Structures are given as structure tokens and as C-alpha cells.
Image (cartoon, grey):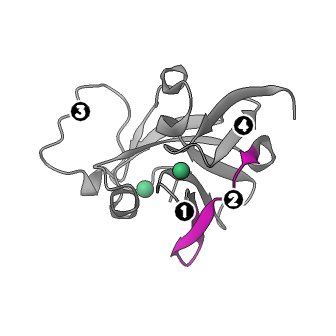
Amino acid sequence: MGDPILSGGCLCGAVRYSVSGRPVDCGYCHCRICQRASGAPLVAWATVPAECLTITAGVPQAYASSAHALRQFCARCGTPISFRSQRSPTHVDITIASLDDPSSLPPQYHIWTMSQVPWLKVDDHLPRHADGGPDRLT
Ligand SMILES: [Zn+2]
Ligand SMILES: [Zn+2]
């Protein structure tokens, strides 16, 4: 772990976090669980080594969104913060849009496009996976 290079937090400011080290990768997820959990058509995630994420203020609430996944969010304002899966316990995903500077981490691919809402038109040339992709978020 080095110095924090990224920081972020929820809408109301109760939950703050920092990330040391570089993200492994960044991608858009169109899965139905992300849609429901966020109330948005897709979620942009950055995957980082689990030990690189530090909650610096507040205590996020956690919800088991499937048998193997845990999602953290602010209990006060609802902002989704993180996603952990027992299938990849060494890494954690953070919501890029909750970063103080989301512009610094452009997503590199799309996953679960089988459930992309049909009215969402994405005009990019990034790799698209109908399912969770080779070894991405699930
Ligand atoms: Zn909050
Ligand atoms: Zn998802």
C-alpha cells in the first residue's frame, strides 16, 4: 500500500474512502442487479486490490445482493460504494462515479450487455461482453 491516489465518498458525505495503488481495470456493468442496486441503467466500476480500499469516514451499510456478493452503500443517502465477491476475494470494485474525480478512470469494456436497456445508446468502441466477460465482475 502506498499513498492514497484516489479519494471518494457518498452524496451526503457521511462515508468517505481512499484508494492506494492503481486500479486493475475499469468497466461498465449492465447487469440487472447493478441496475436495481443503483437505480441507474448501468454502473461504472473500478477494480482494485482489496487491501487498497480504506474507509476513512463513516460506516457503510452492506447488502448481500447474491449468494456470493456484498455491496456497500451509505445508509443515509444510498450512494453505492463498493462490490465484493467471494469469487474474487482479493479484489474489490468501487463505483467510479463516487470518486471525487471520476474523469480519471475511463472504463475499458462493457459486461452483461444482454441486459442493457434498449434505449441506452453507447457510441464507443470498447469490448462488449454479453455476460460477465473473461474474468470480470459477476
Ligand atoms: Zn451518504
Ligand atoms: Zn453488475
> Does residue 49 belong to the magenta stretch?
no
Q: Where is mark 1, residue-wise?
A: 75
Q: Residue at x 60, y 67 (%)?
A: 62
**Residue 7, position as x, y percentages in the image:** 66, 32
Q: What is the magenta range? A: 54-71
**Residue 70, position as x, y percentages in the image:** 59, 67
**Does the residue at mark 3 contact the one at mark 1 (Cβ under 8 Å)?**
no
Residue type at tag 4: Ser
- Mark 3, residues whose alpha carbon is within 10 Å: few (<14), some, or many (≥20)? few
Depth check, mark 3 against mark 1: the one in front is: 1
**Does the residue at mark 3 contact the one at mark 2 (Cβ under 8 Å)?**
no
Question: Between marks 4 and 2, how big is the CA–CA gap?
Answer: 14 Å
Question: Between marks 1 and 4, how big is the CA–CA gap?
Answer: 19 Å
Query: Which one is earlier in the sequence, the residue at label 3 or at label 1?
Result: 1
Q: Mostly what secondary structure, the magenta segment?
A: strand
Element under disc 4: strand
- Give the side of residue 127 with respect to residue 18, left or right: left
